[in-house]
Amino acid sequence: MTTEAAAVNERPPYGWAAVVTTAILGLYILTIAPTAQFWDTSEYMAAAKVLGIPHPPGNPLFVFMANVWGQIPMVEHYALRINLFAAVTTALASGFSFLVVDRLLRDLIPVRWVRYATAAAGIVVGATAYTVWNQSVVNEKVYTLSLLAICLILWLGIVWADRPRGANRDQLLIVIIYLLALTSTNHTMSLLVAPAIMALILMTLLQEEHDLGEWSKWLVFCVLSTLFVFLPGIVRETTETQMTFLFGFALLAVLGLAVYTGQWRFAVLAIVVSAVGMSLYGVLPIRAAHFPPINEGEPTTWGAFIDVLDRVQYQKGPLVPRQADIVWQYLNYLQYFSWQFGRDWEPAVRRALAMLFGGLGLLGAVWHWRRDPKRAAAMTALMVTVTVLLVCYLDFKYGYSLQPQERLHEVRERDYFFMASFLLWGIWVALGFAAIIQWSVDHFFHSREGDAKWLPATPVLLLCFIPLAGNWLHASRAGETLPRDVAWDIMQSVEPYGILITAGDNDTFPLWYIQEVEGVRRDVLVANLSLMNTVWHTRQLKRRGVIAFDSANALPLYQDGGWPVPTEDALSLSYEQLDALPPYAQIGSGQVFQNGGLRAALPEVLERADVVTLQLIQDNLGKRPIYISRTTGNYGERMGLAPYLLGQGMVRKLMPEPVERSDNIVQVSTLGWMDVERTKDLLFDVYHAETAARERPFGWPDRPSESILTLYAIMYGAFAQVLISHVGLTGDAVADSATAELARQADDLARRMFENTSFR
């Protein structure tokens, strides 16, 4: 039996793959986030809980899988269950990657234990890369599920290439096509593996005797996988007649070739499983029509459905002209790559480690091409797709922390888009380890007998533990509860049946989470300024209706009041009127909004969100409490509402008359009017101050979201100054002493909070 035949017939080491999977999962569990975090994690958790629709493209596969997973009572807290879902999917992806590396080395490294150790070392590097690790201990995105799909499909493709021609090989290719179609309904990231499978099939066919029937199957795969990628855009750019013609022509061409070559059954089955897989997208309009609490895009019509699939909400333009110089876009990727192997250490060390592991990966690629061109072509196609082509396609603005001055840049770091490349780089690193081990054996230890000559060459594998040691502090989310606690604090600042105006993801998604998952303060209507510029969010605000205040579980602040229950919708405008609101309204200078004693001088241009906000005030002032979150910055000032806003902790309550100074109401520089007594109750009896002030080794790890933590610090610092200004004024020594002590506590909290920010 030849070496190649022996390698093909050897049983894959599924047991060792399970060991690797379990070890990586154990690491993730040690460093997992205990609850929801900032950015999209809270939105996805809420959507999974209520079977809702998160932001485009809707991710129905994730929502259904996470919903089922979240119902398994493995741990008490729902958020932790969903975070475990991310950890398990990445760990499984690592297990399949281990199988891939073992097969790539099976023809090249004859000793099994060396092969297993080398494969495990490379996979550890990929699994502990900063972005992969960081994203796997909190379900911030749906990408960990896509990682699993990529690694599983890659493994199945390699198994396909080992099989001889026949029905079994055809069945496996049908499974791959189905998985590509199905996982495309999670995210198109899953389709990044398709070029690798194309290359693997192509290289396999080139090594076999020419058979037009086999080539027709390859063309079927290429056509279908391409359609998975471009289907939403194709549908958008064609009329119904053109769409029918386009798809009809493509399918007839594929079927015609299949009939000619006698492979029509394969082609028909491939088309059928593709339709079945992608049919999960059809759940979006069905579920949207039931109006779940999270219903982004509200795809109840054909146009809205296509808008969600094609991500129209994000207004991604053509690739030319580009949003940033392409050189800077590739430099931004290299910056992210340099973070992967020692994020906790100094920049010079990080760059050196990036060169080390980058060099190991490139060495592995070159060595692989020399030894096994067929599978090397597949791996190269995959790595080029998830790096070079992906950077070009995504066309990001200048990186958040790497951009020329005075240029538009991304609102946050986008390294998570490239987590597939960082995980898969571990495969090439494993091949680099193998190249060094083989070279060492050939040049230094060849005189030894049997397996003994391999052992002295394996210490190089210890390099795999560098990312584990160098990323632990930055990648870990263990014990971090601030985002969830922020949601609690902001929500409990609002009186029953209040309307709360927020601004962005990090002051809105956690509120959705705490309402829909934990059931806290569902009576509050959350209106997001950026989302009110869309049609669907304003319709959602009107449709939500009045939800009863949970007085049984209310804070003492709200247990004594007889809070009136609203009897009308928060928005009086009809759905048709809301839909007809323009994106902008030029109203000119000198315009005033008036409601009773409230008179606000308006800016010359109003966005759609501004119009809806004014309508909420018009319909509800005096009927429902209205608040503007301090996270909106100077929005109240821009809308001329500052004289009517009374600060109460993290929010500002809109009053029907101008606020006036009193013993309990003072004006604070940069914060406006403050209700001292109410703010004191919130800061010291309600808020999670110690969560915000706890020591973090490198401060808050995500600078784009540190503004909320900074707001805590500003609030406690300003309140300390307010208290200090009152000391000695009352003439009551005991009261003044207590006030001074409270001021000291507030100042200490503010100092510790600031130490976690870039303002320290």
Image: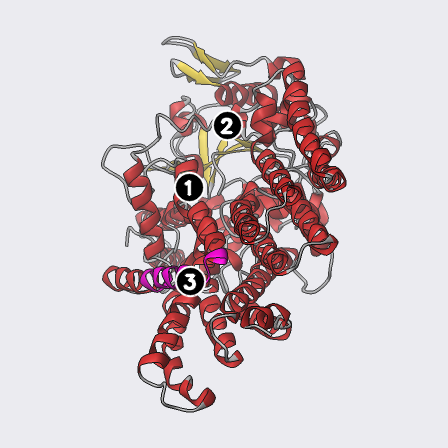
Magenta region: 358-375
Q: Nearer the viewer, mark 2 or mark 1?
A: 1
Residue 364 lies in magenta, yes or no?
yes
Q: Which mark is residue 603?
A: none
Establish if 329 lies above or below 307. Answer: below
User: Which residue corresponds to mark 3?
Assistant: 368
In this view, the residue farthest toward the front is: 209
Which of 344 and 539 lies nearest the eye of the viewer?
Answer: 344
Compute the Cα span from label 3 to label 2. 70 Å
Left or right: residue 481 compared with residue 457: right
Q: Residues within 10 Å of mark 1 (few under 14, many from 20)?
A: few
- Which secondary structure, mark 1? helix
Establish if 583 lies above or below 756. Answer: above
Q: Which mark is residue 655?
A: 2
Left or right: residue 575 compared with residue 27: right
Q: Main secondary structure of the magenta part?
A: helix
Q: Is residue 149 visible?
A: yes
